[in-house]
Image (cartoon, rainbow, N blue to C red):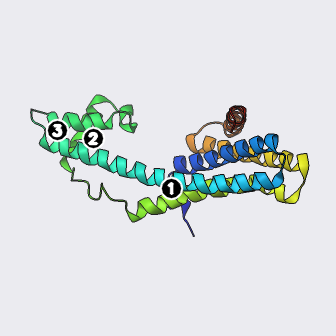
Amino acid sequence: MIKFRALLSPSDRHSEVLFGLIMVLAITGTVWLETGSAKAIISAGIGACIAWGLVDCIIYVYSNLLERGRIALAAQEASTCTGEGCDLRKIREELEGTIVDTLGEREKHEVAQHILARLKPVENHTRATKDDILGGIAAGTLVFISGMPLLLPFLLFDGVWAMRFSSAIGLIMLFAIGYRWGGYVGRNKFHTGTVMMSVGMVITGVVIALGG
């Protein structure tokens, strides 16, 4: 069994589910308008979930390799640069845009010194690791799983009712993602859920209008 919590960060999990939902919502809407065929919608939806699950798997692995490569380059530059305090400046530059920015200048300097003192060459920055592969599989699986509930109504109902139930499921799931995300970032859960649902609807509408 894939342990999503152990392999993916909360941000990654929410993003993958959100992507899968919006993708399938857009596909069901587009195919429904073009054909009105439940069979075509199911076929297109499953195909897209598989395809984009594979794409997300590859992107996840590639992104991890890029990140390790960036860290390895920073470590190399810090160890080889010349000039007084050059190595420390390199570390501080890498810390920009992170949670360290919330600290004062003295604390930032101390953190950079601490990292510099323990900085080691990054191993395996050019090869995918087991964790990379498992994380990629988890990301792709989430995309696939998140889209399946929206296709179930087309197996159980006919015509416009299938589309209505599918859309309702999608909206409920979008709200649930926003609700959970609101709790994670310390914001009002109901408000965040409502915003997420509204934004998802707008994005889906734009994608459908542009041809899916």
Q: Is residue 26 left or right of residue 117?
A: right
Q: Badge 3: how crowded within 10 Å, few (<14), some, or many (20+)?
A: many
Q: Position of residue 63 (x, y in %)?
A: 42, 48
Tell whether label 1 touches label 2 (CB within 8 Å). Answer: no
Quarter of the figure with the C terminus:
top right
Q: Which structural element holds mark 3?
A: helix
Closer-to-camera residue (27/25):
27
Which residue sits at x=36%, y=32%?
101
Residue 57 image label: 1
Q: CA distance from mark 3 to mark 2?
A: 13 Å
Residue 87 image label: 3
Depicted 163 relative to depicted 1: above or below:
above
Q: Which structural element holds mark 2?
A: helix
Residue 111 image label: 2
**In the current view of this chain or complex, which residue is farthest to the left?**
83
Callout in the foreground (1, 3): 1
Depicted 63 relative to depicted 110: above or below:
below
